[in-house]
Image (cartoon, rainbow, N blue to C red):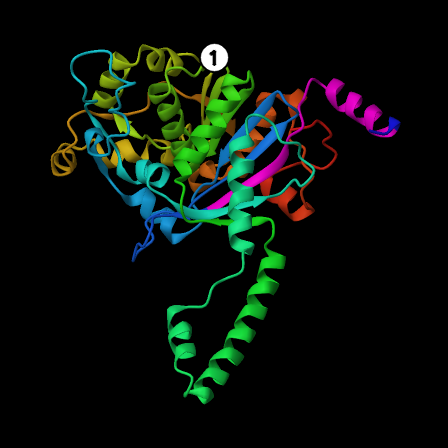
Amino acid sequence: MTAVQQCKQKLLQKHEGGKRYSVDWVLNDWHEEKAKIRWHDTDLIIATSGKSDIVLAFAGTTSAADALTNLQTLEPASHSGLFNQKAVTNSTNSTVEGNIHRGFLNAYARVVRGKIRKINKNHSRSTSTKSLHDYFNKCIIQQHAPQSNSTAIATIKQNKSNNVIMKLVNKRKKRHDKKKDIMRKRNKNVCRSHENRLMDILRDVTTNSLQSGQTVHLVGHSLAGALATIHALDIVMNHVDTPIDRLHLWTFGAPEVADSLFFESAGTRSPRLRAFFSDDARFHRYVTQSEKNCATDTVASITSKSLNRRVVRRLGGVRGNVIHTIDPSFLLCNVSGAELHELGTYLSGLSLLSPKHTLSTDFSSQMKSWLGEKKGEEVEA
């Protein structure tokens, strides 16, 4: 590291106590295996701030598959078995009762196909992301390995008398292989995963980070906040040997993920889950509120408004009330209606809430404008 780089790093560390995060990994387009209809399209980025902090930031609704995820209803938590593992149970009754949102749960637990993209090539391999590095490298090697001929081509090769067909097949195969080589060179930093569940990859990253003493931030706006909540539930309930004192959950305009019976039952079986969701130093839930008419972001309560009606609850088999576990911290703003749910509105509200740590990024001017970043801001996000 040069003297100039050392100087710059010291300035960044001292600058209003803010932290600078670099995006190291992008995991996108995660969906189910062999599905005729894509019910999910889970995306997230993994960013780090030195060796102290790591952020798993999920992406919100951007596709038709994401919309299908949102539109699904609740189902009994016992159906998936995710929260009925032996590690969860402290009593003779091994079943976690209540209902959980089917779409949010499956977008986290059932997606097995997707892309892993390495963004920061100079990022040093840390303990927290070692499993991701190893899997990525293995996947890249498999992608770049020479491809064997198909059964059809092998069969044709055995039939020596059919030379005309063989020539056509070989010519077509050469063109196909050439295109594949070009694509491999372009996508040498992209792994197309077909084996591991996204849930298992995220579990490894989060548990390794917490066990190594890092602070882990699970972040999401709207649908992404619901996915971050499901991941937090999984880590707290199913990984009892992993310390969670440095685990933080940040949601912005996130809808409800489960009903009251689920949280009561899960809290009984996992006392540290109850402690986590009641700790406002680790669980941060934000909702925008209009100064014009005192209305709040409707998406933050859309699940309960849809499913807490008596007739709908009976049709969906929901026995408890669909709820959030804690009251939100309100972010006041001068907009109303659908604008209350926009990401830029939340970012502007956070900047007002913490004026010493206003938003600052290295993004393009168009992206800065979309995020609501003001010109002349210098504090690191």
Looking at the image, can residue 116 be seen?
A: yes
Residue at the image point whose x is 53% and y is 80% from the top: 171
The amino acid sitting under disc 1 is: Asp
Q: Is residue 17 left or right of residue 271?
A: right
Check if residue 6 falls in the magenta segment.
yes
Q: Position of residue 360 (x, y in %)?
A: 67, 33
- Quarter the N terminus occupies: top right
Nearer to me, 137 or 86: 137
Residue 239: image quadrant is top left
Residue 11: image quadrant is top right
Q: Is residue 333 left or right of residue 91?
A: right
- Quarter the C terminus occupies: top right
- Number of residues whose C-alpha sits closer than 10 Å to that of mark 1, classed few (under 14), some (14–19) or many (20 or more): few
Residue at the image point whose x is 51% and y is 47% from the top: 139
Q: Position of residue 120 (x, y in %)?
A: 65, 40
Residues rendered magenta in the picture? 4-28
Relative vertical location of residue 27 with respect to residue 2 in this rendering, above or below: below
Q: Is residue 189 left or right of residue 288?
A: right
Residue occupied by mark 1: 245
